[in-house]
Each structure stands twice: as C-alpha cells, then as structure tokens.
Image: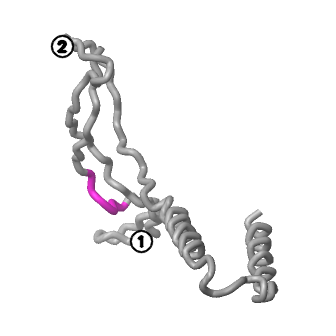
Amino acid sequence: MKKIIIFSIAMIFFLSLLAPSAYAGSKQRHRWQGVAIGLGAAILGNAIINSDRYDSPPERVVVIDRDCHRPRYSAQQSRGYWEVRKIWVEPRCDRVWNPGHYNRNSQWVPGQYIDIEKSPGYWEQERVWVGCR
C-alpha cells in the first residue's frame, strides 16, 4: 500500500514538472496566494511530521474502589485520593550453563544451569488512585 502511495505522489510530482511555464501567468500576479498556499503547506507538513512525537504512554494507575465515609462531591469532582505504595521489584537473573569442573577438594562437579543476578531487587514507590463511593 505504501509503495502505491509513494509511486502516485512521485508521478504527480513529475507530471507537474512537465507543464510549460507559459501557463503559470506573470510573476507579480497572485503572489500573496502563493505565499498563503506555501505557508499552509508548511504548517500542515509540520503537524503531520510532529504528530506522533507527543504520544506518550499513559501513567500506570491502579484504581481501588473503597467505601469512604467522606462528604459527597458534585459530579464534576472526582471522589478519591492518591496513595503512595511500596512495591518490591524482583531481581533480574540470567540462566547460564556452568560446565563440569573439579572443585577445591579435587572432586568432579557435573555441569548444571546456574542463575546469575544481573540487577538486584529493589523497592519502588507507585502512585495508586484510591476511589471512594
């Protein structure tokens, strides 16, 4: 589909170059129309190019519904509050093959898979929205 669109745009561009300049009119005539068309094309092109630049993933929010004994709010105001919780993030480990070898006591240890820790576990704070009815 992209190949067809690119090919048709290229053909339209090359066909526009084939038109003789005699049909263009004088240089002074319709200058401001050309400026307006060029400015509009620049604004539209900039909007198309930068359209996906500001698409960021939404913040991860966990909603927990609780019965809160707080005063009722109007429909426009949200009911609830933010709560900060600590979450344990597991350490990242790689499973690698440890080949057979002799230990310090000259005893043969057969090969086996072992887990090597790449990054240690840590505590992380997460903002959680606690909703009330």
Figure quadrant of residue 72: top left
Three-letter amino acid code of the residue under disc 2 = Arg
Q: Is residue 125 magenta?
A: no
The residue lying furthest to the left in this view is 70
- x then y, percent, for residue 87: 26, 40
Mark number displayed over residue 101 = 1
Q: Which residue sits at x=19%, y=11%?
A: 69
Q: Nearer the viewer, residue 8 or 58?
A: 8
Residue 35: x and y, percent? 54, 75
26 with respect to 109 (left or right): right
Labels 1 and 2 touching (C-beta < 8 A): no
Residue at the image point whose x is 24% and y is 46% from the top:
124
Depth order, front residue of 26/107: 26
Horizontal side of 71 relative to 79 (left or right) equals left
Please identify the quadrant where the N terminus is shown. Answer: bottom right
The residue labelled by disc 2 is 70
Residue 2 is left or right of residue 43, and the answer is right
Circle 1: element type: strand
Q: What range of the chain is rendered magenta?
A: 116-121
* Image x and y of residue 116, in percent: 36, 61
